[in-house]
Image (cartoon, rainbow, N blue to C red):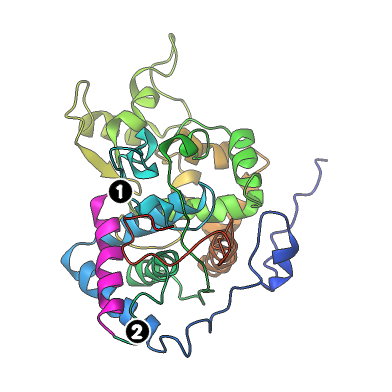
Amino acid sequence: MGRRPNLILVCSLSLSLCLYPYFTCAQLSPHHYSKICPNLEKIVREAVRKKFHQTFVTAPATIRLFFHDCFVHGCDASILVASTKNNKAEKDHPDNLSLAGDGFDTVIKAKAAVDAVPQCRNKVSCADILALATREAVVLAGGPFYVVELGRYDGLESKASSVNGRLPRPDFNLNQLNSLFASNGLTQTEMIALSGAHTLGFSHCSRFANRIYHYSRKMPVDPTLDARYAADLRSMCPRNVDPRIAITMDPATPQAFDHQYYKNLQQGKGLFTSDQVLFTDPRSRPAVNAFASSAHTFQQNFIAAITKLGRVGIKNARNGNIRTDCSVLHR
């Protein structure tokens, strides 16, 4: 008989994690702004809600922005910095060019709403505003509410060169995914839970074209793809398709933050190789099955994982500051 798979456990999220080398979060607390800006969460919530009602893209764009920020030198809002003539910033790296503008606009609008309150003006970091906006985006799309730890400072640099090799690619296998997430102190189960955010959002056809046209010399279509789904993808993404065309990541419930993503994987409907491999690889399949069978199990694991992600590489008063403009570095 094969070895019994490890049980999926959701541990209490104590700040003892801060002793882990990837985390420097002793300063984080849900109550960080209770006296500085007591209505902060309500202010951000209303700003994100208003933006969300203008366009649903607000939700997936903001969540993805948070992930891309945290994976490059930590959750420090460096992804929000605009390039200058002397510095090409993270957002202009090729791996970040597909980040939807609505994510950036969400943070800009939330920051403006916060700064409109005199007591709060220039007292709240862009990194914390992004973390709060991400939670609101999850909730507005139907996902779980969770407590956001606060107290991050904004980073002092943002360089496109820093992005190299720090973000997952759509063709990654399980070993590559595990290695990248482990470099940020995240486990395989946490990686699988965070991948569930692919229940929302869109992808350009070029990101998965190899799976439907050029998988191998003898087999143009990836055999792990459901045949009908592959045909649908070829129909939506014909050869030489307009590169601006994007399709939904979740073909079943594209506008709901739910656990359908994992059911899709069971059916061979993971859009990226890095999605489908979570089911095809026997090491990660038990977690996919567990999340597919229980929305509650997925939600609790997602909350644990995104909270831990929010602790990665945070800055403090010694190596960060609070930007008055999220797009401009201040030293």
Question: In this image, 100 relative to 136: left or right?
Answer: left
Residue 330 on image: x %, y %: 39, 58
Kindly tell me whether residue 253 is visible in this rendering.
Answer: no
Q: Nearer the viewer, residue 199 or 20?
A: 20
Instruction: Pick out the residue farthest to the front.
Output: 331
Residue 83 on image: x %, y %: 31, 43
Check disc 1: other Cα within 10 Å, few if <14, some if 14-19, many if 20+: some
As for residue 197 lying within the magenta part, the answer is no
Give me the residue at 29% from left, 77% from top.
Answer: 115
Check disc 2: other Cα within 10 Å, few if <14, some if 14-19, many if 20+: few
Q: Main secondary structure of the magenta part?
A: helix
In this rendering, is residue 297 above or below 122?
A: above
Badge 1 amino acid:
Ala
Question: To which residue does mark 2 refer?
Answer: 42
Give me the residue at 53% from left, 81% from top.
Answer: 32
Give me the residue at 33% from left, 55% from top.
Answer: 328
Q: Nearer the viewer, residue 90 or 192?
A: 90
Q: Nearer the viewer, residue 193 or 96?
A: 96
The residues colored magenta run 100-117
Q: Nearer the viewer, residue 228 or 183?
A: 183
| Circle 2 SS class | helix
As for residue 116 lying within the magenta part, the answer is yes
Count up the numbered dots: 2
Q: Viewer-nearest of labels 1 and 2?
A: 1
Question: To which residue does mark 1 refer?
Answer: 82
Residue 274 on image: x %, y %: 50, 37
In this rendering, is residue 297 above or below 290?
A: below
Q: Considering only order in the chain, which callout, 2 or 1, is on the residue closer to the N terminus? A: 2
Residue 122 image-quadrant placement = bottom left
